[in-house]
Structures are given as structure tokens and as C-alpha cells.
Amino acid sequence: MPAHLVSIRERIGHDLIVLPAVAACIFDDNGRLLLARHDYDEWGLPGGGVKPDQVPVEAVVEQAEEEVGLMTRSEGIIGVYGGPQCRSTYRNGDQVSYVITVYGCVLESGAPKPDDDEVSAVDFFDWEEIQSLKLMEWMPVVLDDLYSWYARRAR
């Protein structure tokens, strides 16, 4: 946990806080979406929190490299998501409501590899395969937007 969050948690305990986050939408050349298996064996986009004074687009590129070993470049924002489906309670009791900016990213180099810290597995999936996965609660809300972005880009 970043030092600034440790400081906040020391003062407020497990109470709910709202945090900015980013996520990377990465498709391969076959139209398959990259997903990472996170806590609770749930699949979602690679991503994470934005540090104080960090530019969000730099955070998404950093998170893709750290979590799944890929060098990417952003092609812009697909959407910004929040609400009850973006709320989490961690195993230690900490409550967080994320506001997640999803960026459409292009793979520049690397092969998908989990960091084995925040991500235990990573792979590309087609639409049908995704339907059978245990997804993070916010993922069904964004899937149509991700595929619409990919379709526009592929034209």
C-alpha cells in the first residue's frame, strides 16, 4: 500500500474512501481482450490506483507494465466508471469506492506475464470465453464500451 494511503488508513481505519484508478484495455490482433486474474480469483483489466501527483495516462502505462509485463501506449480514454459496482472491501476490512478511468491501449512490446503479486494469471480472451469467467463486478458494465472502442479502432 502506498505511504499516503497508509497515513490515511491510520487516521480513518477501514472507513470508505473514494480513490482514483486506471485500467488498460488491450486487444490482440485477433480481437481478444487481455484480462488479468486479481484478488478473489476475479478477472478484470490490468490497472490500479493513481499515486499523488501522477498523471493518470502515465499511471495506466505503468500499471500494464508492472502487473502484466506489457509495454503499451494509450490511444485515449474509453470511459470513466464508478458507482456501487466499483466498490470493494478488502480482506483486511478496508473499504474503497474506485472511480476508474479506462484507457484504450496499444501493445508495443512484451508478452503477457502475471506479476504474481497483484495478478495471478493473465491471458487474452474472446467474447464467448469472457462470458464464462468470474469477472470483477464492474467488468460487465464496461465490456460493451471496450468492444465498441476496438471496433472503431479496427476500421
Image: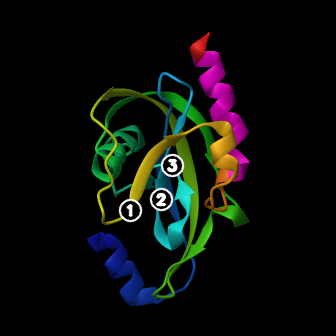
Given contact means CB atoms under 8 Å apart, are the residues at marks 3 and 2 in contact?
no
Image location (x, y in percent) of residue 73: 36, 28
Q: Amino acid at mark 3?
A: Leu
Left or right placement of residue 31 versus residue 115 in this view: right
The stretch of residues the image draws in magenta is 140-153
Alpha carbon separation for disc pair 3 and 1: 13 Å
Judge from the rendering whether residue 79 lies leftward or rightward of residue 61; answer left or right.
right
Q: Earlier in the sequence, mark 1 or mark 2?
A: 2
Residue of label 3: 45
- The residue where tag 2 is placed is 37
Q: Are marks 1 and 2 in contact (CB under 8 Å)?
A: yes
Residue type (three-letter) at the residue carrying disc 2: Arg
Residue at 58% in and 56% down: 99
Q: Quadrant of residue 96?
A: bottom right
> 10 Å neighbourhood of mark 2: few (<14), some, or many (≥20)?
many
Dot 2: element: strand
Residue 67: assigned label? none
Eye-nearest disc, 3 or 1: 1
Occupied quadrant, residue 98: bottom right
Q: Looking at the picture, how far across and down is residue 89, in whole percent?
A: 56, 79
Mark 1 crowd level (few <14, some 14–19, many ≥20, 10 Å Cα): some
